[in-house]
Amino acid sequence: MRVVYFSADQDHAAWIPGLQAAMPWADVQLWQPGSALADYAVVWKPPQRLIDEQTALRALLNTGAGVDALLQLRLPSTVPVVRLDDAGMSVQMAEYVCHAVIRHFREFDGYEADMAQGRWSYRKPRSRVDFPVGVLGLGVLGERVARAVAQFDFPVNGWSRSQKSIAGVQCFKGDGQLDAFLSASRVLVCLLPLTPDTENLLNTERLARLQPQGYVINVARGAHLVDADLLQALDSGHLAGATLDVFRVEPLPARHAFWQHPKITLTPHTSARTLRSESIAQIAGKIAALERGEPVAGRVDPIRGY
Ligand code: NDP
Ligand code: OXD
């Protein structure tokens, strides 16, 4: 069996030996224009040329959870697309989001600023019932995040396409319940896949539905959020702040207004990293299962876009 690997930004010198060791039965090669036909392609943001040339693929395996970049390409409808599911990312997301929620709720950013000025001062304790957290997307990552936040006794809401039932989380579903979900939430966490239905979802109208002094945490994709609408909601005082890990253009352009905004905390798309050894083990397991004709988790539905 032949497997080709290509990534726009991962270190192929580490991935290829790792994939080869996990699949001793396969010949794993870096994809280059003109590479021999393979049975499987393991990819992150591949060029259209890889898809066009590799006409014998039995599956495309995405080395990330989000498939928005891959689904931009013209893909043959007969080749299944399989994404990473979890592979060590959900615990990282839970850490990141809990950290951002607690930092805001406990005003640790304010304490850091005070202490840096040599000021020893206390803030009035706030009540967590006044900080309901809404998680957009209750999939592999969103559900883990919602459960983790609920462990700190915050009221937690979740929104997904299909109805969910998660202990400690009030679950809303579909477009018809989005407004009710937003008005029940003060802190909003985005963990949706980027699809035509979710692009630009976080606009002026939706942000205005959040409770006053709302807070936005975007860890999904930059294009879920309308940048100018977030800035306006922050500057009008309706929103108290935002923590952003993902951006429409990455790296975030040097002149972007987010860099200097006093109410915005930035990180460089690092909330949940692809962990190489976990991901390779999962991908090798999925290829073996596909070869045996068994179903695999993380199979993407190209019509719904995730
Ligand atoms: P999943 O596919 O497991 O979950 C997606 C969730 O979103 C599901 O609950 C789904 O609903 C819901 N959803 C999708 N479309 C809609 C819609 N139109 N209306 C309402 N709900 C919708 O994905 P993951 O949890 O694994 O990953 C989520 C995203 O996180 C990825 O797509 C990626 O963009 C991002 N990500 C970011 C990383 C980072 O470092 N910043 C790292 C990894 C991922 P239902 O359950 O009903 O289908
Ligand atoms: C992913 C990501 O989708 O890293 O896995 O953003």
Image (cartoon, rainbow, N blue to C red):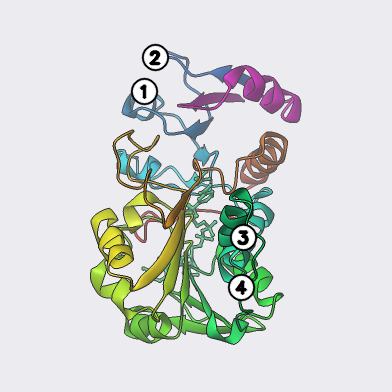
Identify the amino acid type marked 3: Tyr
Give the quadrant of residue 73.
top left
Q: Which mark is residue 123?
A: 4
Q: Secondary structure at mark 3?
A: helix
Q: Position of residue 56 (x, y in %)?
A: 44, 29
On the image, numbered disc 2 is attached to which residue? 33
Q: Nearer the viewer, residue 191 or 2?
A: 191
In the rendered image of this protein, does residue 197 appear above or below residue 297? below
Q: Secondary structure at mark 1?
A: helix
Q: Comparing marks 1 and 3, which lies closer to the viewer?
A: 3
Residue under the point 67% across and 61% down: 120
Q: CA distance from mark 4 to mark 2?
A: 60 Å
Q: Which mark is residue 105?
A: none
Q: Secondary structure at mark 4?
A: loop
Identify the amino acid type marked 4: Arg
On the image, numbered disc 3 is attached to which residue? 111
Contact flag, marks 4 and 2 (Cβ < 8 Å)? no
**Mark 1 or mark 2, which has the lower sequence index?**
2
Identify the amino acid type marked 1: Glu
Q: CA distance from mark 3 to mark 4?
A: 8 Å
In the rendered image of this protein, does residue 135 appear above or below residue 173? above
Quick one: label 2, few (<14), some, or many (20+) residues within 10 Å? Answer: few
Quick one: label 3, few (<14), some, or many (20+) residues within 10 Å? Answer: some
Residue under the point 52% across and 83% down: 171
In this view of the protein, can residue 200 be seen by the observer?
A: no
Contact flag, marks 4 and 1 (Cβ < 8 Å)? no
Q: Nearer the viewer, residue 153 or 53?
A: 153
On the image, numbered disc 1 is attached to which residue? 53
Q: Which residues are magenta?
A: 1-25
Contact flag, marks 3 and 4 (Cβ < 8 Å)? yes
